[in-house]
Image: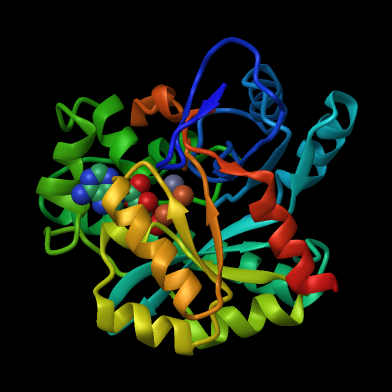
């Protein structure tokens, strides 16, 4: 595997085991693969460190850590939280926290309960506009995962109520669409405090997707430890920009593929959007030295 300047890697056969993917989803949120499958794939791709960052859920971590041990892959604790900044949905990634921390677990189960209630409200709104989706079809899609709009979009498709996944968002459940419902969210400060008390570090996820410079500055002040620099939505220019911000504010960087598998059609990202192990070492140093 050869590292290019932009943080992407090119496959040239087996790798040098020096890369990490710190943004992966499993069936514990809206990913298509189990924790075990993700770790096995990481092994096959030659990664040596990964983090599983399910939405509002740390249920995948014990299994992933155990499989990781047997395959020689370090699995760093991770989670992706949604926070609200002026009504905008912003994602934070957290790493290296104690995933048995009771306060964190209590919050996560509360978020998941709120997600279920929201799914019920969305289904009701769909029914009100004569889209006959049943909650059970959504829950079947979610399985053990935290239920979210991706599951509702998949259920709408499976039931033949929309032609494509994206159409579900455009016509029904995306922001501004008739069956849209807001999610319960913490403020950025509450989220970074929750992660800090659990011993972890907080990062702004994929800022290139939606974050203005003013918002970025507000979020840094809310206690972020770093920014996700490598992400499929960031081109080389964006990566350089965020790396510059990281250096300017003495922050850390993180990065990964945001791989979900399945309907997201993102197979090409696995093992490609990675960061060097120095990135992981810098996190450890910030916490433990
Ligand atoms: P939720 O956390 O339940 O609000 O779901 C958010 C997820 O839905 C995002 O992470 C995306 O994966 C997906 N999503 C949101 N908006 C769209 C859209 N317009 N098209 C496709 N997927 C979307
Ligand atoms: Zn997701
Ligand atoms: Fe995200
Ligand atoms: Fe993600």
Residue 66's place in the image compared with 107, above or below, is: above
Front-most of residues 119 and 94: 94
**Left or right relative to 97: residue 165:** left
Front-most of residues 285 and 111: 285
Q: Residue furthest top?
A: 13
Q: Position of residue 181 (x, y in %)?
A: 27, 66
Residue at point 77%, 63% (across, down): 284
Residue at point 59%, 50% (across, down): 53
- Asked whether the viewer can see residue 149, the reply is no
- Asked whether the viewer can see residue 248, the reply is yes
**Left or right relative to 77: residue 152:** left
Q: Position of residue 206 (x, y in %)?
A: 39, 57
Residue 144 in which image quadrant: top right
Q: Quadrant of ligand 3?
A: bottom left
Q: Residue furthest front?
A: 5
Q: Position of residue 266 (x, y in %)?
A: 38, 28
Q: Position of residue 260 (x, y in %)?
A: 47, 35
In the picture, which quadrant includes the C terminus? bottom right
**Left or right relative to 198: residue 151:** left
Label total for image: 0
Residue 136 in which image quadrant: top left
In the picture, which quadrant includes the N terminus? top right
Q: How has the structure been colored for display? A: rainbow
Residue at point 30%, 80% (across, down): 215
**Left or right relative to 253: residue 61:** right
């Amino acid at each position: 595997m050869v590292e290019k300047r932009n943080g992407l890697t090119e496959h040239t056969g087996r790798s040098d085991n020096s890369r990490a993917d710190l943004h992966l989803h499993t069936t514990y949120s809206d990913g298509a693969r189990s924790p075990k499958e993700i770790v096995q794939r990481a092994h096959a791709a030659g990664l040596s460190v990964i983090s599983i960052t399910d939405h509002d859920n740390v249920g995948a971590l014990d299994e992933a850590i155990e499989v990781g041990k047997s395959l020689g892959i370090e699995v760093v604790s991770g989670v992706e939280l949604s926070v609200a900044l002026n009504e905008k949905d912003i994602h934070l990634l957290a790493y290296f926290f104690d995933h048995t921390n009771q306060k964190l677990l209590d919050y996560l189960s509360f978020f998941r309960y709120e997600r279920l209630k929201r799914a019920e409200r969305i289904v009701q709104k769909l029914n009100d506009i004569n889209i006959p989706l049943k909650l059970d079809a959504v829950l079947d899609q979610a399985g053990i995962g935290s239920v979210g709009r991706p599951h509702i979009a998949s259920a709408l498709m499976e039931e033949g109520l929309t032609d494509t996944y994206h159409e579900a968002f455009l016509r029904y459940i995306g922001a501004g669409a008739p069956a849209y419902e807001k999610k319960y969210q913490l403020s950025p400060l509450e989220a970074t405090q929750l992660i800090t008390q659990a011993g972890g570090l907080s990062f702004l996820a994929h800022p290139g997707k939606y974050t203005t410079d003013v918002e970025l500055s507000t979020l840094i002040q809310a206690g972020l430890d770093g920014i996700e620099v490598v992400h499929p939505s960031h081109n080389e220019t964006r990566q350089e920009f965020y790396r510059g911000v990281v250096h300017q504010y003495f922050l850390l960087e993180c990065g990964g593929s945001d791989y979900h598998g399945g309907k997201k059609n993102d197979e090409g990202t696995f093992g490609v959007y990675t960061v060097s192990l120095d990135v992981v070492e810098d996190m450890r140093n910030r916490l433990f030295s």
